[in-house]
Image (tube, rainbow, N blue to C red):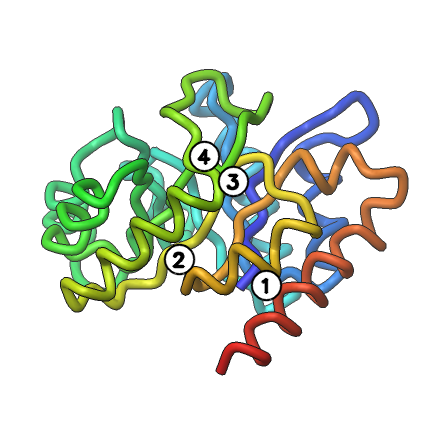
Amino acid sequence: MIQFISHFTERYSYLDGIRLVLDAGVTWVQLRMKEATTDEFLRVGKEVRRLCDSYKATFIIDDHVELVRELGADGVHLGKEDMPISEARSILGGEVIIGGTANTFEDIEAHSRASANYIGLGPFRFTKTKQKLSPTLGLKGYTEIMQRARQRGIDIPIVAIGGITCQDIPALMQTGIAGVAISGAILRAENPTEETQRFIRYEQQTYHSRT
């Protein structure tokens, strides 16, 4: 699974980037606009919902539990400083996808107990797209955390995030993660469409070789 987390650059707006990756084959988009007003988030979110419907893609919003129903989003992703997953679940019910950010095995264990549907584990390495970073994990950190998750019987999908490149995917996928989340690596590429397709190809090849 390749998850795209929205970002903007001098070349691409939030919507430009999302259109680009959907057209390249991504099927999971998270709208993340940390500095936006509610009105701005709603305006862009409504267009992203239409785009995701057109491409039959999953539409996740970042943080804004109160806007999930208004936008018709498929789910929400909650960071470590956002609303607790258990509280979001009680508000949204059992059908809405809820993801949580994790940096440690203990985070994963807590999110699993709180009925998260997936976890974004990271950061793999330093990334400029997030201002408040937890300690970087590196390949060793992912290997150790995923091993502990398997030992405890935790089978919730775990997605790697944070400064990941195509070249990192084979080794990361071997740790047992379900996929990777990407953002700046695509939009900063010389040819973002080709880079997106390369990410998808690397992830699929490695996943199928593992199963």
Residues at badges 1 and 2 in contact (C-beta under 8 Å)? Answer: no
Q: Secondary structure at mark 4?
A: loop
Q: Is residue 88 left or right of residue 146?
A: left
Q: Which residue is mark 4?
A: 123
Distance, label 3 to label 4, CA atoms, is: 19 Å
Q: Secondary structure at mark 2?
A: loop
Of the residues under marks 1 and 4, which one precedes in the sequence?
1
Q: Amino acid at mark 1?
A: Thr
Of the residues under marks 4 and 2, which one precedes in the sequence?
2
In front of the other: 115 or 195? 195
- Residue appearing at x 19%, y 48% in the figure: 111
Percent of width and height locating residue 44: 58, 36
Of the residues under marks 3 and 4, which one precedes in the sequence?
3
Answer yes or no: is residue 69 visible: no
Residues at badges 3 and 1 in contact (C-beta under 8 Å)? Answer: no
Q: Which mark is residue 43?
A: none
Residues at badges 3 and 2 in contact (C-beta under 8 Å)? Answer: no
Q: Which residue is mark 2?
A: 74
Q: Amino acid at mark 3?
A: Leu
Q: Which residue is mark 1?
A: 27
- Residue appearing at x 53%, y 64% in the figure: 1
| Vertical placement of residue 151 versus 196, above or below | below
Answer yes or no: is residue 64 visible: yes
Distance, label 1 to label 2, CA atoms, is: 12 Å
| Vertical placement of residue 50 versus 129, above or below | below
Percent of width and height locating residue 187: 75, 37
Crowd class of label 1 (few under 14; some 14 to 19; many from 20; radius 10 Å): some
Between disc 1 and disc 4, the foreground one is 4
